[in-house]
Image (cartoon, grey):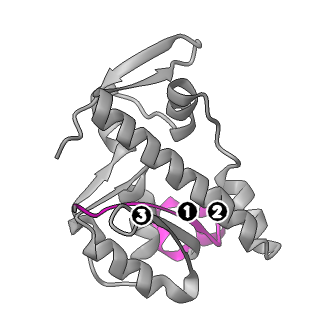
Amino acid sequence: MRNIVYFDLETQKSAEEVGGWDRICDMRMSLGVTFSTARGGYRIYAESAVNDLLRELQRADLVVGFNQLRFDYEVLHGYTAFDLTQLPSLDLMVDLKERLGHRLGLEAIAEATFGLTKTGEGMQALEWFKQGKMAEIAEYCCFDVKLTKLVHEFGLKNRQLFYKNRFGAMLSVGVDWAR
């Protein structure tokens, strides 16, 4: 069985707190979440278990995320010398941007395709971290992983996704993720 690992993480610090977007590796992971198709379940990683998270990603047949190449992997580069961009990866945001010529958010796709909205946003997760509310971060991050998995599986099966443009019109985009 092919092991697809769906992945997301949240950070301890904002870009502003670390001196800008060119210092993503200094943001530090507050919590990471994976869903492994081989394991059939979620796993939550605290910062103290970041090496276990890195091992799981390295053992995956495919790592699927939403903006993991530019963001999540860069955060993890603060913990390892291994170039995570060498992993077999599908960054749904990057793929969709190449197809459409502009970025789409995960929520824009999930809402149009499934009628689902995210349970929070990244800046809120930073506040939760400062307040020690790790359970809230875990719930938020798990739901983002679930949305990523749903979007990927829908795209695989239907070879298209739906989204609303900035004027509220429902549009579709073809995808080819059968690799």
Q: Residue at x 48, y 23 (%)?
A: 163
- Residue interval drawn in magenta: 2-27
- Residue at mark 1 to residue at mark 2: CA–CA distance: 5 Å
Q: Nearer the viewer, mark 3 or mark 1?
A: 3
| Residue with the mark numbered 2 | 16
Relative placement, left or right, of 123 versus 160 is right
Taking the view exactly as shown, the residue that stands out farthest to the left is 179
- Give the mark nearer the N terminus: 2 vs 3: 2
What is the tally of numbered marks visible in this picture?
3
- Label 2 is placed on what type of residue? Glu
**Which percent across, then down, holds residue 11?**
60, 68
Taking the view exactly as shown, the residue that stands out farthest to the right is 131
Q: Residue at x 77, y 64 (%)?
A: 127
Relative placement, left or right, of 14 versus 40 is right
Mark 3 falls on what kind of element? loop
Q: Which mark is residue 20?
A: 1
Q: Kindly check if marks 1 and 2 are in contact, taking CB atoms under 8 A apart as contact.
A: yes
Q: Residue at x 51, y 40 (%)?
A: 106
Relative placement, left or right, of 104 versus 121 is left
Mark 2 falls on what kind of element? helix
- Label 3 is placed on what type of residue? Gly
**Which percent across, then down, holds residue 178?**
19, 41
- Residue at mark 3 to residue at mark 1: CA–CA distance: 37 Å
| Residue with the mark numbered 3 | 40
Q: Quadrant of residue 6?
A: bottom left
Relative placement, left or right, of 104 versus 81 is right
Magenta residue check for 6: yes
